[in-house]
Image (cartoon, helix red, strand yellow):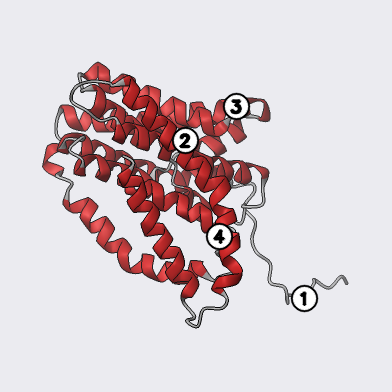
Amino acid sequence: MVSIAGVAAPFVLGFAYLKLRGDTNIEATFVAAAMVATSVGITARVLADMNVLSTRTAKIILAAAVFDDILAMVVLAVVAGSASGAGVRWVHLGVLTGEAVAFALFMMFVAPNIVRQLHPRLAKFSTQSSTLVVALAICLFFSWLSVKIGMAAIIGAFFAGLMFADYAPQWNLPPRVGGITAFLAPFFFFDIGSRFNVRLLTGNLLTAALVISLLAVISKLIGCGLPLLREGWTTVFQVGIGMTPRGEVALIVALVGLQSAILSQPAYGVVVLMTIVTTLLAPPILRYLFRDEIRVPVEENASAPIQL
C-alpha cells in the first residue's frame, strides 16, 4: 500500500501541475514518471548510519522503496515506449504495458531459477572473476534486450540486478561491482551536469522547478504516509520523508528522456533540480525524525560498569 500510493500520488500531482502550466502530454508524463522513483541507496545509507535499520519503520521504508523502483521501471518502460508526437496510440500502449509487466515478472520469478542452475557450473570456471564476468554479461544482454523491445536500457540492468541479488554476497559481487561503480559514477554525474543549463532556470521555469520539488516531497508524504495513519504521525512522517529522495533513479529517467528527444532542456532542468532538492532535504530531516530511535553502537569488548 505504501509503495503503490507512493507511486500514484507523485505521478498524478506532477502530471496535473505540468498540464495546468500548458506542457505537452508526453513531457508532463515523463516528468511525472521521474517523480515516481525512490532512491533506496540514499535512504538505506542514512538509516544505516543511524543504526535504525532493524526498526519496523525502516523495514517498511526499504521494502516499499525497492517495490517503488520496480513500479518506476514499469512506468518508465510504458512512458518511454509510447512517446509519439501523434498522440496516444492505445493498442501500442497496451502492448508496451504487457511487455513491461511480462519482462518484470520474468526477471523476478523465472530469472533467479536460471541463476540457480548456473551456480554450480560457475564454480568450475578457472578464472576467479567468472561470476563477475557472467553477471556483467547478463546485465548488458538484458539492457540490450530491453531496448530492442522498446524500453530503456536501465530497465534490463535493474532487473538483472534483482536476478543476481540472492547470490551477490556469496559470489562476493558487491565489493567488486563497487569498484566499477566508484570508477564510472563520476563520469555519470559529470554527464548529467554537463547537460544541465543553469541559465534556463529563471523566472517561470525556476518557479515551476520549485513547485515540482515541493510536490515531490508532499506527494510522498501523502501517498506513503496515509496508509500508515493508524500508526501515528511520527511513523507517517518517517516513512514519507524516507521515501522522498529521488537520487540517481530520477536522473537516469531524465537522461533517457533528454536523449530520446522527449524532454526539452527546460524540463530536464526541472527534473535535475527536483532531484537535488529531494536528495539533500531528506537526510537531515530523517535524522531529526529518528532522533529518539538512534542507537549508538556499543563496543563488544567494553567492560561493564562496576557497582560499588
| Spatial separation of the CA atoms under disc 2 and disc 3 | 25 Å
Q: Amino acid at mark 4?
A: Val
* Label 1 vs label 3, nearer the camera: 3
Which percent across, then down, holds residue 265? 15, 38
Residue corresponding to mark 4: 115
Q: Residue 227 — which label?
A: 3
Disc 1 and disc 3: Cα gap in Å?
A: 44 Å
Which residue matches tag 2?
A: 101
Q: Please indicate, yes or no, whether residue 253 appears anywhere in the rendered image.
A: yes
**Image check: 179 left or right of 174?**
left
What percent of the width, then of the height, locates residue 296?
Answer: 64, 60
Q: CA distance from mark 1 to mark 4?
A: 46 Å
Say which quarter of the image contains residue 219: top left
**What kind of element bears circle 1?**
loop
Residue ID at (33%, 49%): 153
Mark nearer the N terminus (1 vs 3): 3
Packing grade of label 3 (10 A; few <14, some 14-19, many >=20) is some
